[in-house]
Image (cartoon, rainbow, N blue to C red):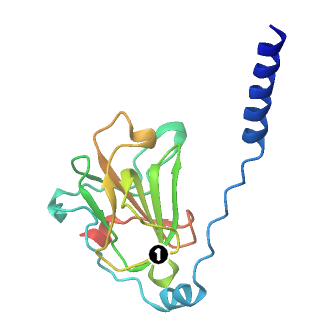
Amino acid sequence: MLRIRSILILIFAVIFISACSTAPKKPSQPLNAAAVQKLKNMSLPNKLPIPVQGVKSNNLTDTWGASRSSGRIHEGVDIMASRGTKVFSATEGLIADLRNNNLGGKVIWVLGPNGSWHYYAHLNGHKRGLRVGDYIKKGDLIGYVGNTGNARHTAPHLHYGIYLGGKGRGAVNPYPYLR
């Protein structure tokens, strides 16, 4: 009995020590300064391609400014499509962030021309192998339509936002850019 107890204590100790001693996650690599400068020197086009495969401009609805939960307003356009439909980058840019969050679910932030920030949210997934720091071209595959985050009870769609004041700041209506 004492031997079994000693073995169980030893097993618990090994599990506890290994759980406490795991290496911390490495921080994301900083973005390439030369690529950031190149993007800042580029102009943001007045017209951008719709970033969801097969969606035409006459299928878009301007959802900018619509009321949302907790007194928020909608800072983007929802582009309806079937789950798994390909999502392409609307601009040349740098993959600046790949993460999950409560509102957007699986999201991608792209730093684009003229320091613009492009937000792709509610994704079903990111393109396999996509990494923070990757330089992408307009039209490159970056993910797939879904309904993650606070959209889990809605139809699959891409939430696409453009920010001109920095990441998550200075939202502008993307609808006119996509028309």
- Residue at (72%, 48%) from the top-left corner? 22
Q: Is residue 69 above or below residue 22?
A: above
Q: Nearer the viewer, residue 123 or 159?
A: 123
Identify which residue is drawn at 53% across, 43% down. 102
- The quarter in which the N terminus is drawn is top right
Q: Is residue 63 something one can see in this rendering? A: no
Q: Quadrant of the C terminus?
A: bottom left
Q: Position of residue 50 (x, y in %)?
A: 25, 67
The residue at which mark 1 appears reads as 134
Q: Splitting the image into 4 quarters, where does residue 158 fall?
A: bottom left
**Amino acid tagged 1:** Asp
Residue 87 pos. (x, y %): 29, 62
Residue 3 in sight in this render: yes
Q: Is residue 65 left or right of residue 5?
A: left
x, y (%) of residue 155? Answer: 28, 40
Please state which of residues 135 and 172 is positioned toward the viewer in this rendering.
Answer: 135
Task: Identify which residue, 35 or 10, lies in the foreground.
Answer: 10
Q: Is residue 48 toward the left or the right of residue 17 in the image?
A: left
Is residue 148 placed above or below 6 in the rendered structure?
Answer: below
- Provide residue 4's location: percent of width, then percent of height: 77, 14
